[in-house]
């Protein structure tokens, strides 16, 4: 019997990159990608890419908040299957954060 878990694959609160390898016997579904610029003085690039295919799920920029705003964000809603052995790669520049979440199917 298969089990389903809601999980965060990538969580970056500062500039950098992070990966999540889908375990053997599992299927991941990327459901949402959220990029936030929480007061940075300039725009910040973010991306999420699959390997080994090289396919980008997203590649964009989060603009700096305008006067009177505390935060500026982009929410991407999707349903993308990532097979066992594939890797989700997330990256973000200084001034922004990135969360990639979804479901992990087991069994």
Image (spheres, rainbow, N blue to C red):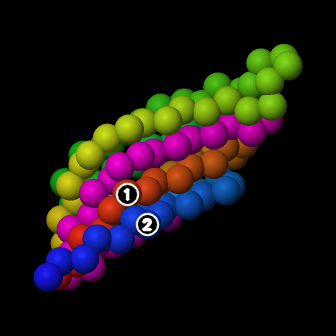
> Looking at the image, can residue 75 be seen?
yes
Q: Which mark is residue 102?
A: 1
Which image quarter is the C terminus in? Answer: bottom left
Residue furthest right as drawn: 68
Residue furthest top as drawn: 67
The answer to whether mark 2 and mark 1 are in CB contact below 8 A is: yes
Q: What residue sits right under mark 2 in the picture?
A: 7
Location of residue 13 with respect to 35 vertically, above or below? below
90 sits to left or right of 11: left
39 sits to left or right of 100: right
Foreground pick, 40 / 1: 1
The tally of labels here is 2
Which image quarter is the N terminus in? Answer: bottom left
Q: Position of residue 21 (x, y in %)?
A: 33, 72
Give the crowd class for mark 1: few <14, some 14-19, many >=20 residues within 10 Å.
some
Write down the region rendered in magenta. 18-43
Residue depicted at 46% across the width and 54% down the height:
100
Q: Main secondary structure of the magenta part?
A: strand
86 sits to left or right of 92: left
On the image, which quarter does residue 81 sit in? Answer: bottom left
Q: Earlier in the sequence, mark 2 or mark 1?
A: 2
Give the crowd class for mark 2: few <14, some 14-19, many >=20 residues within 10 Å.
some
Secondary structure found at label 1: strand
Q: Position of residue 59 (x, y in %)?
A: 42, 36
Does the stretch in magenta take in 71? Answer: no
Residue depicted at 56% across the width and 37% down the height:
45
Secondary structure found at label 2: strand
Foreground pick, 42 / 62: 62
Q: Position of residue 73 (x, y in %)?
A: 61, 33
Q: Position of residue 12 (x, y in %)?
A: 60, 58
Residue depicted at 80% across the width and 24% down the height:
69
Residue depicted at 63% across the width and 40% down the height:
36
């Amino acid at each position: 019997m298969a089990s389903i878990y809601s999980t965060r694959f990538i969580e970056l609160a500062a500039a950098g990159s992070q990966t999540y390898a889908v375990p053997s016997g599992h299927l991941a579904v990327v459901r949402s990608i959220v990029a936030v610029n929480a007061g940075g003085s300039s725009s910040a690039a973010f991306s999420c890419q699959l390997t080994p295919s090289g396919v980008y799920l997203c590649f964009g920029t989060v603009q700096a908040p305008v006067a009177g705003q505390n935060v500026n964000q982009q929410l991407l809603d999707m349903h993308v299957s990532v097979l066992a052995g594939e890797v989700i790669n997330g990256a973000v520049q200084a001034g922004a954060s990135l969360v990639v979440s979804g479901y992990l199917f087991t069994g």
